[in-house]
Image (tube, coloured by chain):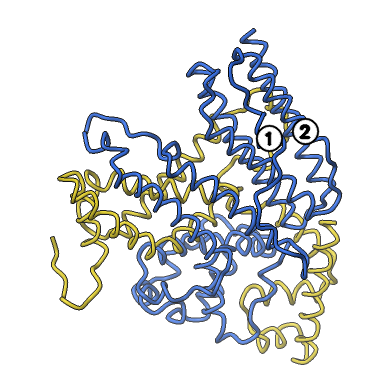
Chain colours: A blue, B yellow
Amino acid sequence: MKLYAPDIPDDPAELPGWLERHLTGLDLAALVSELEAVHGPGPEGAATLDRVLGDRRGEVLDRGLAALPPDRLRHLLRRPRLLLELQDLVLSSGGDHWRRAGAPSPDLDAWVALGRMRLEGFLADEGRGLSRREVLPSSRPLAWYRRPAVVGLATAASVLTAVILYERVRPRGASMIASAPAGWGWSNPGALPQGLPPAAYLDRLADAAEAWFQERPDDALALARRIGEFRQGCSVLILAEHRALAAEDRAWLVERCRAWAARFDAHLAAVEAGRDPGTVRAEADATVRALIEALRARTRDLA
Amino acid sequence: MESTPHDAAPDDEFLAAIIARRHESEQAMAAAHSPMNDLYDRHARSLLAFLAARVERAYVHDLHQDVWMRVWRHLPERFHGGKFRAWLFEIARNALIDHARKRRAEPLAGEETLPDPRDDRPDARMIEQERMAILTRCLDGLDAVSAALVRARLGGEDYASICGRLGLKPERAHKLFHQAKDRLKQCVERAQS
């Protein structure tokens, strides 16, 4: 867990720029929580953002935090939740200064690139007329994530995400893994069998999930890879047709898979944040056991 | 529709107006893609920073995509001029509210007893509880002078004022603060291992 608040600049003249980089970056929540650990939440009736900015509000929006006197900047540090309000204000209403205020951020660049790829895929489907029904006011458009171009791009995006995440955790000198994760669990080609009754189909999905326990990674890198591979299996389930299932069961499965995928994203984030791999693996074990039980329970309901 | 100078980049509202007319014809639909990409390029970074401060990282990317989908879907009938960026962030705030409501309404079948790695309260997502708890414990482990120095520096107080108040020489104050920083970082690392 990296600390941000202790890196506050020694030179008071650098404080506005330092705060601006946090307001425009990805770590403001962490900074706010650290400052709140130091200063507490503040007394009831503490000054609002409007009172802190006062007559300098317009200047702050145009020129940045250098327009604020030092005592008001200090007030923001001691009432750190005001920084969240300030971020909302400057990002939604600030001038060009705030567009230039951000520091270089590979993480932010990666997210922007990934989002653009998905957007382009969606717009490409629009252009091919696959969602012509969106042109008609009474039609419901096909959910964007089910469109063929987006299905392919989503799978590619998952691989790209896995590669980017792996690049962040791999030791120096390790060769880059450019290929897709190994096909186990739900990524195994035989994991989604055709021609089975619904109960048996879900039972096979539960069996496939049991593969999680076949390897027990001990270090952060191996665990991150294992989690990423299982997580990609979630994408396979979310995007598959599940012809063996009725519409209601299909909708249930996709909804649950999205929730399980979010849990695995959280487990991966925990590994990357430096939490003990053994602890995170135990938490991931619990998630897998719970999803297997959910699938088995649904199987019993259908039998 | 606002016209633009010949050699200036079109403003957000001009681009939004093109997107808003996409239903008029197939050509209008095709012409709407580039402005949509341009708006994305202009505002994605700010929007991601805004979302990252308010939800767990695991949700930021999907929520970001959800916001741009809402922009595309609702621009024709719900953007009535004014500043596009302000409207975009209003959409983002609404998406955050919907996300929080959905998280509260969806206990997972057979998984209610699991300790959720993500706290369910929006303000707790913003304020990282674990980070706060660890840092608070580590601050409590500092001696009184170092703790006072850390609180003063992280409150934006400059060294001249701190030294006058705590009776320290500047060199000593600098050294103590940087030692305290190192101890805090080591303490946090130990707490996580």
Is disc 2 on the same chain as disc 1?
yes
- The residue identified by callout 2 is A211
**Amino acid on which the number 1 mark rests in the picture:** Asn
* Left or right relative to A259: residue A171: right
Residue A245 on image: x %, y %: 54, 18
- The residue identified by callout 1 is A188
Residue at x-position 70% and y-position 58% = A177
Choose between A135 and A21: the one closer to the eye.
A135
Choose between A12 and A265: the one closer to the eye.
A265
Measured Cα–Cα span from mark 1 to mark 2: 10 Å
Residue at mark 2: chain = A
Residue B74 on image: x %, y %: 29, 44
* Secondary-structure class at tag 1: loop
Instruction: Classify the position of the N terminus of chain A by image quarter.
Output: bottom right
Residue A225 on image: x %, y %: 73, 50
* Secondary-structure class at tag 2: helix
Question: Which mark, residue B19?
Answer: none
**Amino acid on which the number 2 mark rests in the picture:** Ala
Residue A169 on image: x %, y %: 73, 61
